[in-house]
Each structure stands twice: as C-alpha cells, then as structure tokens.
Image (tube, grey):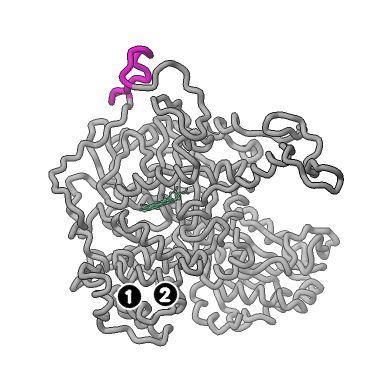
C-alpha cells in the first residue's frame, strides 16, 4: 500500500484530469493574457497619493476575477467533500445487467464520490443532525453513470412535486434565516406532522445514522428501485447498497454538538487524512434484485421511495468494491464543480416509474444550468466522461471545444451521416420497453398510503441504546419548536409509530400525547390532508424486526483509522508507550500525543517526541479512545491540569475505551472512571489486546445509564 500511496494512484479519470492541471512552480506571474506582471501590490495612480486610474487593467483583471469567484451553492447538499477512486467488480452479473461495469471483472472503473450534508450552507458544520449525501460518478467505458444516493435507504417524500416544500420547511426560516443546518425548528415539524409520508425518513433522521463518526463509516443507498436490463432485454428491479468495510458507526449527539465547535470540518478532514495516510476508504456494492414477476408480492410498493426492502426479505448480494485512493487537487475545480445527474445512466441500467425519481430526472440538469452557468457543464474537466463525445449540440455559454466541420444536424450527407447512430448491438442506448396502459391522472397511488408500518419496523429493530438516542433526538428537536400545537401534532404521529416512544418524548417536553389530532389543523390544510388520510387502522407487521437496520449488528472487527489520544507530560513511560503504540499502529489505529503544551515532550528515556496537540487546542470528542501511559512525573503533571481530567471524563461519558498503565490509574482515580472500575472498556494495566478489542467495539453501551450522572 505504501508504494501505491507514495506514487499517488491513478485511474483513467485522474490521468485524464492531468491535462488540465496547472503547476504553479518555478514560474513567474502573468496576467490571463500571458503578460509578465512585475507589481501585484500597487494600483496605478495619478501621483503617489493620487486617485487610481481607470486605465489600470492589471487592477481590473485582478479585482473582477475576485468579484466573480463564487458560483451559487447547491440548493441542497451545499456542504460536501469529494475524493477519487475506482470500482472493481467481483463477479459478472450478466444474468441481470448488460452494463460493462457489471460484466467485466478486469476493469477498474474510475469514480469520483461526493459526500454531503443536506440542509446547511457550504460553510456549515459537518456534524449537523442530517441525512448525508452519497453521490458516486462512475466514469465507465460506455459513458458516465451517476448513482446519486444518501446514507439512509429511504426518502422523505413520495413525489418530486413535494420536494420544494420539504426543503423550504427544513431550510432556515425565511424571515430571519434561522436556524442554520438544523431540522430542529417549527417549519420543518409543521411540514412533517402534516405529511406523514415523511415519517420513515424522519425517524432515521432521529437515529444515530444522522450523526456519523465518519463518511467512511456510513452505508450508502441508491434508494429508488431501478431496473437492471440484461442482453436479452429482460428487466429485474434493483436497489443499490454501499456497505462500508469499517462498519457503520456514529458519534453521540453530545459529541456532535461539541465537535461542531472544536472542528466543524471533522468529516472533511477525516476523509482527507485517511486518504493521505494511505488508509483508503472502501465500500462494497450490494444489490437487492427482484424479478419483474414478483413486483406485487410485497406489502409495500416497490415504486414508493419511502419504503425499503428489508434485507431479511431480499438479501443483499455483494458484487464489487469501491476504493477511494486520491484526494482532489483543487476543491473548487473538482468537488464544487462536479455535477451529478440521476439521469446519467448506461445501457444495462434503467429507471422505474418511482415518481420521486422521475422528478429528479428533470431537476438535476436544470440546477446545473444556473449553478455552473450553462449547458456546457459536461465540458468541465471533472464532469467529462472518459470516452469521447460527439453530437450536434452546439454553442452556449463557455463552449470550450472547437467542433470542426460544416454540419451540426442529423441526418446529413455532407459529413457522411456523422455522427452516426449506434445500433443497439453496438451499445446504443434503448429505453426499457415497459408496457403501459394508463389514464393521465394527477394523484398518488393507493399502494403508497401506508406511512406507519416501516417507521415502526425501524424503531422495533433498534437496540435499546439506539432507541434511547431516537427518543432523545425527538425530545431535542421538538423541544426547539416554539409552537405547542406543532409539538402535540408530532407527539400524536410518533404515537402512531410507537406509543412508548411518544410517551418518552412527551415527558421530556412536559406535554401529554394527544388522543386525537385537532380538527382545525386539518381544515386549514384541506380535506386531503395526509394526516387524516393515511392513518392506517392497523400497522402492517410483515417482519417483527430487521436486524440489518440496527447499528448494533454492524462490523466490530477493526480499529483501523481510529484515533487514540495518548495523554502525556514530560517523564512519561517510554516502555509502556512504545508497547501500546506499536500494538495500536499495527492494527491501523492513529496514535496522537496530547500534552500540556505544544512542541516537544520528553519521555523517561530522555527522548523528544513531537506533540500532536496541546491540550488547550484539542477536545476529547475528536478521538475514539484514550490511553494514559505511566511515568510518575507525567501523571503528577496531568493531574494538576483540569482539562486532562475533563478530557478523560468526557471520553468516559461518551462510552469510549480507556486504557491506563499501573501508574496511570492514579490519574483515573481523579476522574469518574473511578466509579466504574469493572467496566469492560476500561483496561488498567492490561495487555494492549484488551484495549484494542474495546476500541473495535466502538462504545461500551452498558455504561450508558451510569454515565448520565456525570456533569460534563
Ligand atoms: Fe437531490 C443534489 C440525493 C431527491 C434535487 N441530491 C443532491 C445530492 C445528493 C442528492 C447526494 C448532491 C450531489 C452532489 O454531491 O453534488 N436527492 C438525493 C436523493 C434523493 C433526492 C438520494 C431521493 C431519493 N433531489 C431529490 C429531489 C429533487 C432533488 C426529489 C428535486 C425534485 N438534489 C436536487 C438538486 C441538487 C440535488 C436541487 C442540488 C445540487 C445538485 O442537484 O446538483 O437538483
């Protein structure tokens, strides 16, 4: 891996991008016209203290360029981070799809991936409680395929027509532009409580999935049911899943709030650092396949994007792996300008009539026109396919190509019919010929009407600690609502998911769960209000629980890339530190030295060690575990610094693994750890292995009730 890391691994796409790289090394400064510049600090003036002259083209070029540096941020998913990588197929799935990417196991298909939050602006915190975008651009040999998904397997609404309402409700309220990057406010819950189709995604939003530990530890989902089309033209329904090799892990809300202050770029930095360190993030691609004939065998509609297919009903088949191995050269040129369109598909993949997907097929192209300035956004280097493109589309803002020849129409004879059409056998795209016998009608299918069964399935499938987090999240979010009728309406809808959950939240809010919904609300929003229409007399229970929905059943087999804070001062035990540090780094963990000051710290073998962070500049929430090596002098110093005590207490409160050597125990005795010495994730004077296993478990949730007493 090291060799690969040093040489900065290339894909066909990163090779292609090199043609556009601009090295600014050993070069003099010029204007955009190539004129050598010898002063970029002073404008041209009429006399030393005189007015600046209009003639000053150097000033004008520099300032106008600066004035126009910004492009409109994405209306949603404005905050994001990207990386390059590649996708490899394990086994051909030609029985389902004729797509080259799904047939040819020898290919390394280049990808560019952008992760994002949804609601916040470009500069908002990474740790907002939010859905995360998971958009993958595959540069395939048959053209570009974009799988534009999220880290949750379902969406808030069933029809694209409602998207502007959903987004307007969650964005900062229009009169005072508050709150930033937060769903915890009246307008969002006003909308949610009136549109019960949102409840499934809403309860996922209240779960730990909304506060990931890392982009590298999230699942991704294509959400919609798509089609796979094989060589015979047979269609199968498919749902796409990304499964992270590191498992699915989250932070606690208390951490999220504090990380937002300590390092609001936490996820961006984490992704960048992991790739720079050669710890390449990996996900496996899985598919759930349903034969056309089985379309109606489920208790929900496959075209309804607010429903998932439980993995226990249709298992996920793992078909390949994506590796991210290269950071972008330039954030704006690549991550900001990348344009994902769900309408970018390749032969072998096709759409279904999911009404949310259908609307997206329009929206994404449309948004790039204003975001990237015109119809030629596909010519921006990051958006260019790795295969040549030829057609008769011409001109427009920022045309950077020079199409040669006399013709720009089809059919033509002047250019010998070029560009000619590809026959299907030559890979020409043909849409799946779906039989349709329909009336033109503006309505929602009855089969989409069950809004409560799957949120209830999700909640039932969570572990005790996950359920507690959901209750806490609802209490927090609704507690931030100012209007009691909205809070009560939400309590009523939550009660339709789970009565016990509603009671817990109501207690936290100091309210009662209403027995019914107030009439005036329904009148105000019309007779067709979802709240009335979609109350099923009984929730369907086609599965008691779906274990795959719970993070308690994720992978706990690795500590790779976990950050371990080592708390030291001068005189710390080098022998103990070396043993532990070697064991941790062998397993791929990142060991960070935290000391009372920056610069260097000296161990008991009189060696200098570089300090990674002075205690004043860092916070416990930025690490996964804490280790305290012995050394009498070191421990004595740490004990006198209140922030080290707070650091340990916080890690303990957040249920993290803590290890100390015999003398380190002295320091732990000054913390709340003293009250839980038998805790399975506290290892005192034990072999490194015990600590490693505790870190791999991510958290010790058994501690959850006990640590609530800690006043940090
Ligand atoms: Fe969307 C961006 C994911 C529904 C309209 N969306 C955007 C991005 C992701 C998603 C990951 C960011 C892409 C990037 O990194 O550049 N969106 C989804 C998913 C949806 C979904 C998983 C439902 C399953 N979106 C959706 C609907 C509409 C949009 C129904 C409109 C009708 N989405 C947009 C957009 C954005 C966008 C306004 C903003 C920037 C962009 O497209 O390029 O067009």
Q: Quadrant of residue 492?
A: bottom left
Question: Does residue 309 appear in the picture of this structure?
Answer: no
- Check if mark 2's residue and mark 1's residue have beta carbons within 8 Å: yes
Depth check, front residue: 503 or 319: 503
Residue 50 lies within the magenta run: no
Depth check, front residue: 196 or 408: 408
Residue 692 drawn above or below residue 521: above
Mark 2 surroundings: few (<14), some (14-19) or many (≥20) residues within 10 A: many
Residue at 62% in and 64% down: 623
Q: Which residue is mark 2?
A: 474
Question: Does residue 340 appear in the picture of this structure?
Answer: yes
Instruction: Specify whether 448 is left or right of 247.
Output: left
Secondary structure of the residue carrying numbered label 1: helix
Q: Which residue is mark 1?
A: 494
Q: Quadrant of the N terminus?
A: top right
Q: Residue 187: x and y, percent?
A: 40, 70
Q: Residue 704: x and y, percent?
A: 50, 77
Mainly helix, strand or loop, the magenta region? Answer: loop
Residue 421 lies within the magenta run: yes
Instruction: Specify whether 370 is left or right of 40.
Output: left
Mark 1 surroundings: few (<14), some (14-19) or many (≥20) residues within 10 A: many
Q: Residue 49: x and y, percent?
A: 85, 48
Instruction: Specify whether 323 is left or right of 230.
Output: right
Q: Magenta stretch?
A: 410-426
Residue 56 drawn above or below residue 314: above
Depth check, front residue: 254 or 593: 254
Q: Residue 146: x and y, percent?
A: 41, 42
Residue 453 drawn above or below residue 323: below
Depth check, front residue: 392 or 382: 392
């Amino acid at each position: 891996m090291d060799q690969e890391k040093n040489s900065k691994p290339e894909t066909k796409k990163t090779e292609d991008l090199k043609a556009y790289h601009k090295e600014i090394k050993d070069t003099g400064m010029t204007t955009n016209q190539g004129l050598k510049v010898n002063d970029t600090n002073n404008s041209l003036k009429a006399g030393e203290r005189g007015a600046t002259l209009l003639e000053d083209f150097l000033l004008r070029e520099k300032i106008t360029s600066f004035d126009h540096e910004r492009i409109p941020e994405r209306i949603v998913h404005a905050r994001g981070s990207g990386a390059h990588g590649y996708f490899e197929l394990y086994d051909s799935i030609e029985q389902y799809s004729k797509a080259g990417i799904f047939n040819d196991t020898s290919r390394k298909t280049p990808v560019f991936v952008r992760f994002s939050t949804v609601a916040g602006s470009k500069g908002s915190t990474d740790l907002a409680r939010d859905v995360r975008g998971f958009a993958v651009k595959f540069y395939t040999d048959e053209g570009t395929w974009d799988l534009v998904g999220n880290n949750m397997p379902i969406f808030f609404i069933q029809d694209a027509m409602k998207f502007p309402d959903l987004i307007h409700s969650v964005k900062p309220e229009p009169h005072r532009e508050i709150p930033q990057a937060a769903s915890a406010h009246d307008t969002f819950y006003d909308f949610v409580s009136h549109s019960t189709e949102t409840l499934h995604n809403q309860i996922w939003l209240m779960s730990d999935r909304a506060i990931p530990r890392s982009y590298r530890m999230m699942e991704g989902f294509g959400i919609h049911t798509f089609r796979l089309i094989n060589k015979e033209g047979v269609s199968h329904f498919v749902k796409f899943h990304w499964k992270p090799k590191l498992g699915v892990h989250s932070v606690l809300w208390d951490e999220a709030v504090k990380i937002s202050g300590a390092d609001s770029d936490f996820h961006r930095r984490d992704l960048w650092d992991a790739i720079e360190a050669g710890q390449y993030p990996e996900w496996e691609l899985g598919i759930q396949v349903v034969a056309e004939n089985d379309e109606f065998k489920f208790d929900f509609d496959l075209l309804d994007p607010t429903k998932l297919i439980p993995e226990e009903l249709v298992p996920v088949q793992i078909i390949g792996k994506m590796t991210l191995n290269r950071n972008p050269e330039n954030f704006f040129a690549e991550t900001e300008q990348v344009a994902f369109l769900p309408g970018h598909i390749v032969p072998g993949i096709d759409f279904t009539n999911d009404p949310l997907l259908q609307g997206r097929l329009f929206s994404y192209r449309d948004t790039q026109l204003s975001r990237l300035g015109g119809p030629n956004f596909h010519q921006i280097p990051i958006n260019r396919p790795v295969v040549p493109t030829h057609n008769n589309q011409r001109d427009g803002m920022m045309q950077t190509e020079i199409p040669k020849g006399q013709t720009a129409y089809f059919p033509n004879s002047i250019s010998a019919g070029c560009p000619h059409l590809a026959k299907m056998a030559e890979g020409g795209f043909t849409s799946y010929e779906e039989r349709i016998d329909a009336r033109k009608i503006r309505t929602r299918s009855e089969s989409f009407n069950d809004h409560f069964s799957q949120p209830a399935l999700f909640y039932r499938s969570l572990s005790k600690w996950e359920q507690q987090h959901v209750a806490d999240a609802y209490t927090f979010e609704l507690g931030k609502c100012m209007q009691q009728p909205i809070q009560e309406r939400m309590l009523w809808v939550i009660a339709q998911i789970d009565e016990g959950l509603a009671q817990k939240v109501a207690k936290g809010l100091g309210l009662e769960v209403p027995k019914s919904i107030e009439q005036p609300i329904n009148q105000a929003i019309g007779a067709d209000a979802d709240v009335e229409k979609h109350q099923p007399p009984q929730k369907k229970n086609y599965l008691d629980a779906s274990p795959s929905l719970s993070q308690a059943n994720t992978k706990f087999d690795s500590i790779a890339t976990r950050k371990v804070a080592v708390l030291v001062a001068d005189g710390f035990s080098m022998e103990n530190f070396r043993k532990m540090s070697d064991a941790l780094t062998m397993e791929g963990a990142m060991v960070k030295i935290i000391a009372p000051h920056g610069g260097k710290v000296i161990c008991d073998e009189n060696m200098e060690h570089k300090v990674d962070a002075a205690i004043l500049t860092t916070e416990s929430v930025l690490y996964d575990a804490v280790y305290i090596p012995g050394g009498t002098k070191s421990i004595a110093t740490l004990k006198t610094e209140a922030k080290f005590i707070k650091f340990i207490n916080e890690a303990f409160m957040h249920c993290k693994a803590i290890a100390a050597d015999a003398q380190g125990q002295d320091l732990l005795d000054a913390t709340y750890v003293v009250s839980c010495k038998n805790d399975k994730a506290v290892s005192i004077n034990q072999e490194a292995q015990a600590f490693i296993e505790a870190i791999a478990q991510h958290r010790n949730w058994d501690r959850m009730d006990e640590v609530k007493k800690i006043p940090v």
